Image (tube, rainbow, N blue to C red):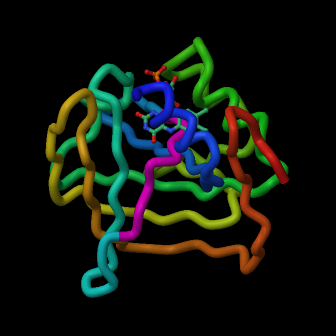
Amino acid sequence: MKEKFLEVLRTTKQNVFVLAAEKGEEKHAMTVSSVFSVSLEPMSMMVSVNQQAGIHDVLQVNDKFSLNLLASNQIEIAEICSGSEEGQVRFEHDDWETEEIPYLKNAQSNLFCSCKKIIPLYSHSLVIGEVDKIFHSGNMNPLIYQDGKYVS
Ligand SMILES: Cc1cc2nc3c(=O)[nH]c(=O)nc-3n(C[C@H](O)[C@H](O)[C@H](O)COP(=O)(O)O)c2cc1C
C-alpha cells in the first residue's frame, strides 16, 4: 500500500519553496513542498520538516525563518537545497540575501515568519510560523514539482 500511497502523491502538483533559517553564524536552507497556509488571522504557515534534516535543530520557537516560493526559473537553487551537500555551501549562489534572515531575492515571493510551534510527529516536525513580512514579485509563475521532476 505504501507504493500506492507514493504513487498518489507523485500525481500531485506541488509548489516548491526553500525554507531558510540561521542560528548564530550557522545558516541552513532546504527545499520543501509540504507547505500549507494555516490561517489568515493571524497569517500563519506550516511546513513539515524531516527530523533528520540539517535545518531541523536550527528551527526554534520564537526564532525567524523564511519560506521562499520559487519561480519557474529557479530549478538550480531547488536542486542545490535538496542535494547531497548541506549547510553553508547551499548559500554559495547569487540569489541569496543573507544580511538578516536569509532569503532568496529572485523568488516569486518571500514569507518571513516567526516560529510559534514545533510539533514532532512520526519522522517529521510540523513547524508553524506567523507571517511578519512579505515580499511579492506580483508574478504568477511558480516552480512546480510532479512525478519526481520539475515541470512548467
Ligand atoms: C521538490 C522537493 C520537495 C521536498 N519537500 C520536503 C519537505 O516538505 N520536507 C522535508 O523534510 N524534506 C523535503 N524534501 C527533501 C529535502 O529537501 C532534502 O532531503 C534535503 O537534502 C534535506 O536537507 P539536508 O540535506 O540539509 O538534511 C524535498 C525535496 C524535494 C526535491
For residue 30: magenta? yes
Magenta part, dominant SS: strand
List x then y, in percent, for residue 27: 44, 31
Is residue 9 placed above or below 113 in the rendered structure? above
Residue drawn at point x = 51 percent, y = 74 percent: 134
Residue furthest out toward the top: 84
Residue 19 position, x and y percent, is: 47, 45
Query: In which image quadrant can residue 96 be found?
Result: top right
In this rendering, position of residue 152 left or right of residue 60: right
Q: Residue at x 15, y 54 (%)?
A: 117
On screen, 96 above or below 27?
below
Which sits in the foreground, 89 or 55? 55
Q: Residue at x 71, y 36 (%)?
A: 77
Figure quadrant of the N terminus: top left
Q: What range is drawn magenta here?
A: 29-37
Between 22 and 116, which is closer to the camera in this rendering?
116
Count the marks: 0
Residue 135 percent coordinates (x, y): 58, 72
Side of 144 relative to 45 (left or right): right
Is 32 within the magenta? yes
Name the residue nearer the viewer: 97 or 71.
71
Q: Residue at x 41, y 62 (%)?
A: 36
* Left or right of residue 130: residue 103: right
Residue 41 vertical position relative to residue 1 in the rendered view, above or below: below
- Quadrant of residue 148 within the rendered picture: top right
